[in-house]
Image (cartoon, grey):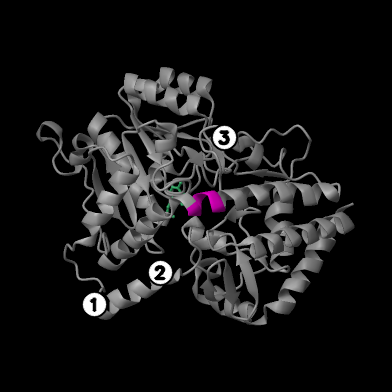
Amino acid sequence: MTGFDRLRGHLVREYEKKTDRSRAIFRRAEKVMIAGGSHTIRLWRPYPFFAAAAEGPSVRDVDGNTYIDYWQGHYANILGHNPRLIRSRIAACLERGALHTGFEAGHQIELAEALVQGLGGREAKVRFTTSGTLATMYAVMMAQGLTGRDHVLKVGGGWHGASPYLLKGVKFHADDGFEGRESAGLLDEIVRRTLVTRFNDVADLERAIAEHGDRIACFIVEPFLGVGGFLAASKEYLERARQLTAKHGILLVFDEIISGFRFCPGGVQTLYGVRPDLTTLGKIIGGGHAVAAVIGPREIMEECEHGRGGGDRVYFEGGTFSAHSEYMKAGLIMLGYLADHAATVYPKIARSGERLRREIERVFAAEGIRARCTGDGNDVVCGSSLFMVHFPRTADVAYDRPEDIHDPRRSDLPMREDLLKLALLVNGVNVVHGGGAVSSAHGAKEIGATIAAYAEAARLFKKYLD
Ligand SMILES: Cc1ncc(COP(=O)(O)O)c(C=O)c1O
C-alpha cells in the first residue's frame, strides 16, 4: 500500500467518525438522485457532508460539525453565508408577498441600473436570466445572430457553464489537452465550431483569429479566470483581444460571472479599462439567489427585440423565474452594500486572501512539501480574495497558464482533490480545489484557524508521503 493510500484511508476513517448522519443521508440520496446529489462539485468522496445551517464564514453539518467555508455558495457569498442584512429584509419582503407572480415588477429596473453603473455607467441594456449557463448561452446566440457567423472562440480551461456552445476545452484531457469535448449528446457540428485558444497567450490569439477570424462570432473570456485556475489576464492580452476582435468584426464577451463585484463594486473590466461588447454576470449579483444577466450596448442587446434587416431575432425571451422580484431585491441589497462599503470590504478580503496564499505555501514548505497558490492579482487587479492550491510535480511549474494547473504531469491533482480536501475537512475547513473565496465575514480568527488546519494537513502529508 502506498503512503497516499494509507493517508487516504486514515482521513476517510476520521471523516466517517464525525459524519454518521451525513453518510446515512447520502445512502438515501444515492437511491433517488444521480450520484447522490444535484451538482458534481458538491459530491466529493467518500460522500459529502449535508449542511444544516450556515452563517457568515461557517457552515454546520447535520452531525453538528462546523467548518470554516471557502466555497461560499459557489463563490457567490462575498458577505458570507446568509448575511443578516439580506436575510432580514428578504424575510420582510416575503411577508408582504414576494413569491413569484409572473408579472413585471420594479426592483429589476434598479438592479439593471446598478449593473450598468458597475460596468462603468455608459449607456447599456440588461436582460436578466436565472443562471450563468443561460447568460453565456444567450451571449453566444446574440453574437451569432448579430454577426451571421457560427464559430465561437474560447480559452482552454475556461468554464462558462453547460451551454452546448461552450462545452469544449474545459478539462485537460490526456490525449488532446484542452481541445476535447466535455459531454456526450453534443452535435459534432457544434463541437467543431467551438475553437479553443490558450489563455493569456497573445500570439495564440493572433493565430486563431488570423486563421478563423471571418467565421468567429465571438471570443468569450473571463478577465480573471475562475475555475480554470484563478489567474488574472494580463492587460496586454485583453487590450489585444479588444483590438483584434474589433478589427475582425468579432464580438468580445467578458464572462464576469465570478469576477463581477468580486474585486471592486463592478466588473473587473473597469480596472483593466477594456470594454467588451457583451458582459455576463451572475453569482454575487443575486445576493444568494438565482440571478444572472447579459449586458451590452443598446444596438447589440436590441438584437433580441428585432432581428437585423427584418431577419430573425435572437430568442432571448426570458424564463419562468427571470427577474423574480425576491431575487432582484436581494441583488439590490447586496450591490447597494458593496457600493457603500467598497472601501472596507475589498481591501479586507484581499488582505485575507494574500495572507492565506502566503501562509499556505509557507506551512507546506516548512514540512518540505512544494505547494503553490494562485489567485493573486497583477499590476491591474491589485488584491484578490481568491486562492487555489497546487502541488507542482517539479520546481519549475510557473502557474501562469491553466495547462500548469490541470495537466496531471505538472500538478498532483489527487493530492489536492482527495487528500487536501479530506485533511482540511477533518480539521474543520471546507475548500474546493484546495482553496476558494474569502468573504468579508472571515475574520482574523477564521483565517488563523484555517492556516493552522493547512499546517496540520502539511504535517500529515509529510508523515505519510515521505
Ligand atoms: C465564469 C463562469 N461562467 C459561467 C458559469 C455558469 O454559471 P451557473 O453555474 O450559474 O450556470 C460559471 C459557474 O461557475 C462560471 O464560473
Residue at figure coordinates x 79%, y 52% from the top left:
363
Q: Earlier in the sequence, mark 3 or mark 2?
A: 2
Residue 136 appears in the figure: no
Secondary structure mostly taken by the magenta-highlighted segment of the chain: helix
Discs 2, 1 touching: Cβ within 8 Å? no
> To which residue does mark 3 refer?
378
| Residue 171 circle label | none
Which kind of residue does numbered mark 2 sit on?
Leu
Give the CA separation, mark 3 to mark 1: 46 Å
Give the CA separation, mark 2 to mark 1: 19 Å
Please tell me how crowded label 2 is: few (under 14), some (14-19), or many (20+) other residues with Cα within 10 Å: few
Q: Position of residue 431 (x, y in %)?
A: 63, 59
User: For the image shown, how many numbered marks are present on the structure?
Assistant: 3
The magenta span reads 344-348
Whether 163 is among the magenta residues is: no
> To which residue does mark 2 refer?
85
Residue 218 appears in the figure: yes
Q: Nearer the viewer, residue 340 or 134?
A: 340
Q: Nearer the viewer, residue 23 or 382?
A: 382
Which kind of residue does numbered mark 3 sit on?
Asn
> To which residue does mark 1 refer?
97
Q: Position of residue 119 (x, y in %)?
A: 34, 41
| Ligand 1 contact, mark 2 (Cβ < 8 Å) | no
Residue at figure coordinates x 35%, y 32% from the top left:
275
Q: Residue furthest left?
A: 310
